[in-house]
């Protein structure tokens, strides 16, 4: 490192010159006080005549900047201590209308400095229409009522609320919601709760006025009961058709109501279902006839199925020997007057049943109880399968002959005659 030679004459002169230069600068700064420019940031902008907007149903939505930067010029001693709070900047909203407006910033003069510039010079102000909207109030129930109970009617006072504010925000309000907690409750609720304004995304909107701010809510708590559903059918199907089956799904429903109202209810009827002149199966949702003060739990409607089938006709032929004889006395024999005559049974049944019927499914019989020997006309009776209708029996009566068994026994049979003749021939030989 090179050593400084303090005895060097040039070096000493430089030191002396620097010292006098500093003395001169200090003198100028303190005594002469030159003019300078200073930037002052974060100067707050005051808003004037905002109330004039409300008088014209307008409101200030937003402003591009709330502070500005100001440049001032003045003597150093005056300017150096100027603070943002020392500067008064303002915009005046009077006379401006709905929409986007460019408003100049006005800055008050300073007594000891001059305003030379500001940034920004214009502020962008969004002025919206001030609107009011009457909206219905809905209630959300939080939690579940006690076991065996459910919420019933909900009454509100008032039922609507007046929402006021900038149109662009008010128009975003989708619902007005009040929330009531019913968890574990079995008695009616009466309470006062605040309301929330929600948009379509269910987010809360808070920058609006509401009148009123709260709502009185009453929630009735009702008893639950499970009951049967009874279908009510009106009319008749098309001729030669009939109902073969009726099904309701579900067979039971849960109702709710005051305990003294529902305790005597065991079934709920459907509203009448008209099947007049129907020839096809019917499947549809049905409404229920709910008594006054009784409500359905859930909103799913029961479905009814009415099966309708066409009737078919057929006939079966029977020999008289196929007729069963009931209550014939032990001492009598029965003969048919015309044993070759056929018995014809005409029947009607739905198509499904008719396709499975056979002759053996029918039983023909006559009842000869209390009949004595001789000729008689007796009714032919038929035992049929279930859901089969007898349309006609031809003939309806048959003629029978009842004879004593003893009389018949005295006459030798053909076999007995042959046997007697053979015995006679053997005796002769």
Image (cartoon, grey):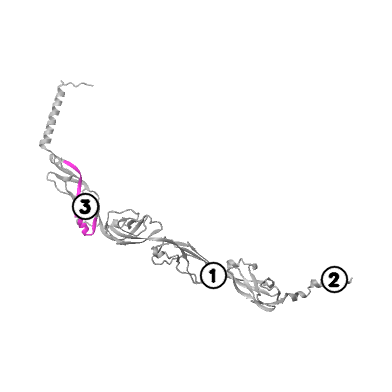
Residue picked out by circle 1: 242
Q: Is residue 227 above or below residue 371?
A: above
Q: Residues within 10 Å of mark 3 (few under 14, many from 20)?
A: some
Q: Tell whether label 1 touches label 3 (CB within 8 Å).
A: no
Residue picked out by circle 2: 423
For discs 2 and 3, the disc positioned in front in the rendered view: 2
Residue 90, position in %: x, y?
Answer: 18, 50
| Horizontal side, residue 157 vs residue 338: left or right | left
Quadrant into which the C terminus falls: bottom right
Q: Is residue 316 magenta?
A: no
Q: Is residue 286 above or below residue 32?
A: below
Residue 352, position in %: x, y?
Answer: 58, 66
| Residue sitting at the far right | 429
Q: CA distance from mark 1 to mark 2?
A: 71 Å
Q: Nearer the viewer, residue 44 or 118?
A: 44
| Horizontal side, residue 383 vs residue 96: left or right | right
Residue picked out by circle 3: 103
Residue 188, position in %: x, y?
Answer: 34, 60
Q: Nearer the viewer, residue 382 or 114?
A: 382
For discs 1 and 2, the disc positioned in front in the rendered view: 2
| Residue sitting at the far bottom | 375
From which residue to which does the magenta span run?
37-59
| Residue sitting at the far left | 31
């Amino acid at each position: 490192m090179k050593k400084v030679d303090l005895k060097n004459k040039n070096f000493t002169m430089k030191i002396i010159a620097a010292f006098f230069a500093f003395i001169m600068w200090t003198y100028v700064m303190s005594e002469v006080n030159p003019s300078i420019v200073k930037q002052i940031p974060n100067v707050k902008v005051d808003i004037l005549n905002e109330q004039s907007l409300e008088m014209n149903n307008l409101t200030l939505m937003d402003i591009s900047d709330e502070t500005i930067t100001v440049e001032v010029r003045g003597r150093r001693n005056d300017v150096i201590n100027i603070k943002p709070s020392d500067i008064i900047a303002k915009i005046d909203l009077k006379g401006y209308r709905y929409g986007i407006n460019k408003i100049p910033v006005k800055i008050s003069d300073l007594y000891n400095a001059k305003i030379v510039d500001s940034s920004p010079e214009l502020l962008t102000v969004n002025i919206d229409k001030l609107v009011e909207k009457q909206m219905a109030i809905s209630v959300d129930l939080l939690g579940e009522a006690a076991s065996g109970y459910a919420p019933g009617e909900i009454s509100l006072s008032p039922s609507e609320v007046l929402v006021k504010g900038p149109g662009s925000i008010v128009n975003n309000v989708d619902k007005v919601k009040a929330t009531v907690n019913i968890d574990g409750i079995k008695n009616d609720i009466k309470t006062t709760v605040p309301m929330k304004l929600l948009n379509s995304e269910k987010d809360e909107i808070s920058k609006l006025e509401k009148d009123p701010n709260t709502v009185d809510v009453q929630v009735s708590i009702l008893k639950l009961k499970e009951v049967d559903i009874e279908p009510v059918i009106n009319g008749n199907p098309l001729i030669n058709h009939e109902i073969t089956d009726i099904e309701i799904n579900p067979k039971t429903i849960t109702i709710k109501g005051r305990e003294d109202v529902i305790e005597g209810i065991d079934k709920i009827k459907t509203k009448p279902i008209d099947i007049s002149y129907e020839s096809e199966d019917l499947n549809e949702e049905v409404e229920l006839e709910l008594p006054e003060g009784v409500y359905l739990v859930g909103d799913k409607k029961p479905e009814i199925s009415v099966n309708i089938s066409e009737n078919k006709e057929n006939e079966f032929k029977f020999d008289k020997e196929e007729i069963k004889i009931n209550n014939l006395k032990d001492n009598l024999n029965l003969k048919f007057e015309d044993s070759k005559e056929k018995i014809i049974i005409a029947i009607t049944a739905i198509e499904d049943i008719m396709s499975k019927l056979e002759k053996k499914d029918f039983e023909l019989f006559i009842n000869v109880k209390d009949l004595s020997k001789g000729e008689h006309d007796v009714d032919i009776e038929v035992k049929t399968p279930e859901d089969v209708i007898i349309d006609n029996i031809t003939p309806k009566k048959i003629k029978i002959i009842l004879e004593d068994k003893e009389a018949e026994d005295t006459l030798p049979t053909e076999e007995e005659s042959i046997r007697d003749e053979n015995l006679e021939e053997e005796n002769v030989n």
